[in-house]
Image (spheres, rainbow, N blue to C red):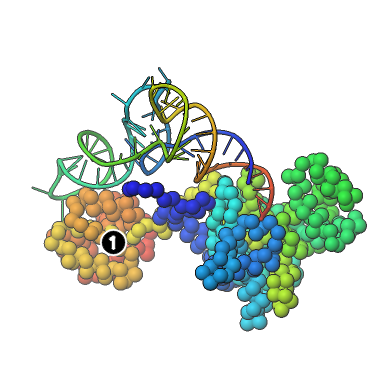
Amino acid sequence: MAGPTFQALPGFRDFTPRECAVRNYLFETWRRVARRCGYVEYETPILEDTNLYLKKSGGELSAQLFRFEDQGGRDVTLRPEVTASLARIVARHQRDFPKPLKWFEIGQCFRYEKPQKGRGREFHQFNVDILGEPGPAADAELISLAIETMLSFGFVAGDFVVRVSDRKAWINYANTQGIPADRIPEFLSIVDKLEREKPAALEEKLAQFSLTPQAVRDFIADPANASFDYLFIEEDLGARGLGDFVELDLSIVRGLAYYTGIVFEIFDSGKSMRAVAGGGRYDTLISTMSDGAADMPATGFAMGDYVIRNLIEETPHAAMQMEVWLQRNAAACDVFVVIAAAEQRENALFLVSSLRRAGISADLPLGQQKLGKQLQQAERSGARFALVIGAEYPLLTLKILASRTEETGDASNAIDWISDRLRHPDGPLLA
RNA sequence: GUGGUCGUAGUUCAAUGGUAGAGCCCCAGAUUGUGAUUCUGGUUGUUGCGGGUUCGAGUCCCGUCGAUCACCCCA
């Protein structure tokens, strides 16, 4: 090939069949768990009016937007998140639904950041929200879904932990320390960076509020500072049998200004990676985004595909579970038809067509190949069965590829026969 | 945006400054109706790109692009 060779843009990925199957594993697990817990799926556009994001956050975030002018002169942005779109759609349509809303979306988002481990410029996110319910029962319900999701990926106690905090506890603390209300966001932002800031700078910043790093750390370390909502959640999740997965961690504040209450993050137990998921309560965002047209309390979280995948691959039992799923779900077909005698090709075509129409995934070789090659092709396709059609037609041989055994049957009832065999696992063999 | 490390075949990697190689993968055959193993043969490179030093650069120097890791940030 002459000229430059093309590759995916920095931070973007090609999904080969294997990569795509892994992605589908994540998506299907997310979707299954959400539905199981009573959430419904919605979807919003991938491209939005840039103002939607500037209004919500503003500031430096605009530097990380995939932003451009479309051919109609509109200032548009590839979505960096879905919460803003959710706020819009909810503000507009919320009267059509009984409360609370339990909604989820699986979608691709874009952020112009430097790619590194656990982060690309494009990623998929599982977004789950409960809207219209102000009490901590909603937060507990949401956190339980986050935990159930982890369990569905095969993680067990000891693999991960949900660290829960409450901004209300911090706001109370700020009040008792005499911090003026309009400076609380600034204060929370300092708390958020407590362990990342240089000691000298940290001390200086806290001094503005007549506080010391030690005083703040003491507050974090004291379980007595847990809020009422946190205690409620702890009890609620305990009753669900999920108490072991949650712990109080007041050091979690999260960077975003719009969180108003409970906030939480999921970490791998070794805390060797960035957060697997994070979220919290944002009771004023819907109102802000809709200029007061709709005012709904809300709580939600998001889980990205990068970190959860890394964690699955580094956790043997979770990785094993994914491999099993991939073997069952990523095969090119279930039945590979092998043509042992070239003159049987027409019968084979009819057979393949019938199988397919009956809902059975079937494939066949396109050229004339030797038997050995065809069987090899069958094996590589990942199919469970190779159906051999040869001179004995209408007698067919069904080879169970994994066990290298076989059985015979008649072409006239091939559909029923094979459907039946597909329904049952390859148990003890008759062969 | 800042910094560290690294760029050689599809891939994993070799090549004291002196003629660019191997394994794997892929394709075909040995095997005329059975998947393995083995054997044989075959395809592929402006050594990321551009300069510089040198008689001579994959190798040394500078730039650039890309990958990766960390910082920043993390909606």
Is residue A147 something that shows in the picture?
Answer: no
Amino acid at pointer 1: Asp
Q: Give the left or right position of residue B2, taking residue A11 as reference.
A: right
**Residue drawn at x 65%, y 65% as measured from the top left:** A53
Q: How many marks?
A: 1
Left or right of A392: which side holds A30?
right
Residue A409, percent across and down?
Answer: 23, 63
Local crowd at mark 1 within 10 Å, few (<14), some, or many (≥20)? many
- For the C terminus of chain A, the image quarter is bottom left
Q: Is residue A323 visible?
A: yes
Please determine whether, in this image, residue A209 is positioned above or below residue A72.
Answer: above
Q: Nearer the viewer, residue A138 or A202?
A: A202
Q: Residue at 66% across / 58% down in the picture? A: A61
- Where is mark 1, residue-wise? A363
Dot 1: element: strand
Residue A284 horizontal/vertical position (percent): 74, 69
Q: What residue lies at 30% left-to-right and 72% top-to-bottom?
A: A357
Q: Residue at x 18, y 66 (%)?
A: A347
Q: Chain of mark 1?
A: A
